[in-house]
Image (spheres, helix red, strand yellow):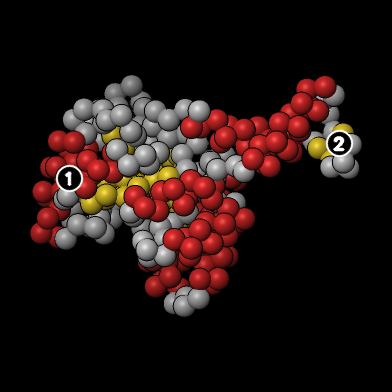
Amino acid sequence: MTGNLAFPPLTWLYAPGDRPEVVGKALVSGADVVLIDLEDAVAPDRKGYARAATAERLAERPAVPVHVRVNALDSPWAEADLAALTTLPGLAGLRLPKVTSPSEVVRVAEGTASAEGGAIALYALLETALGVERAFAIAAAHPAVRGIALGEADLRADLGVREDAGLDWSRARVVVAARAAALPPPSQSVYPDTRDIEGLAASCAHGRALGFLGRAAIHPRQLPVIERAYAPTAGEISRAEEILKAAAREPGAQALPDGRFIDTAVVREAQRTLSLARRRC
């Protein structure tokens, strides 16, 4: 879960921090989480303005959970980003770009901890081969880490990958690392072509098959596609309900009349399916 959400988020919409009007539209777009970007979407000469505009926006708690992608931790702007934002009531989480080591996450977590010992929720973006190689260590580095995800554009450049399938090993590794660290399944990286709806749908289907849950978007028109791709189908909901009814009647492993075998793991998956199905109810 994320921020004040009572259900797993499926859609995470990026909006540039130096465009307050775009952020405002993102907040009413229907996205589960809005990601204000202070990094890639903001030119160097507008970093200060983007930070100030974001701080003003987050001085009050918005209706939708808002995360902020700060600048890379080794950049000239990261320290000011963290100092300006981490105590604001409207901040639900921080996205840390280009994380390559557990120590980076620990440093941010300890630096943002409140007097009561709590730290802001952190989400590490793995955008290099080294970051992917250390995925589990980063995911398990601190209790404040609530999720990890790939930054595929930078990772593609770092690996020299030309075909999309060349990233599948890294994708699977990040999914496994997140689950091994008892974190939610990661969300997919953004699909950069905002007009290629069919391509986005196919990419989401592939991501779901790999174990991702939900996806970051860069345009509101992508949100319904992501929602449809990751929300359970009517058939999946029906099967999940049947599994839970059977488990309630007879605890333990068993075979259903149609031959399907169910056990504790299958029941947990059915529970997650129904949780996702109820998220818009």
Name the residue nearer the viewer: 263 or 117: 263
* Residue at the (48%, 32%) spot, across then down: 280
Q: Position of residue 239 (x, y in %)?
A: 73, 38
Q: Is residue 165 left or right of residue 260?
A: left
Q: Position of residue 68 (x, y in %)?
A: 29, 44
The quadrant in which residue 194 appears is bottom left
* Residue at the (12%, 55%) spot, across then down: 46
Q: Residues within 10 Å of mark 1 (few under 14, many from 20)?
A: few
Q: Is residue 239 left or right of residue 14?
A: right
Residue pointed to by mark 1:
21
Q: Amino acid at mark 2?
A: Leu
Q: Helix, strand, or loop for circle 2? A: loop
Name the residue nearer the viewer: 177 or 103: 177
Q: In the rendered picture of this protein, how many numbered marks are placed on residues?
A: 2
222 up-or-down from 268: above or below:
below
Q: Amino acid at mark 1?
A: Glu
Q: Is residue 127 at least partly visible in the picture?
A: no
Q: Is residue 273 left or right of residue 99?
A: right
In space, the residues marked 1 and 2 are separated at their CA atoms by: 54 Å
Q: Position of residue 113 (x, y in %)?
A: 32, 31
Tell me the number on the disc at residue 256: 2
* Residue at the (48%, 46%) spot, across then down: 227
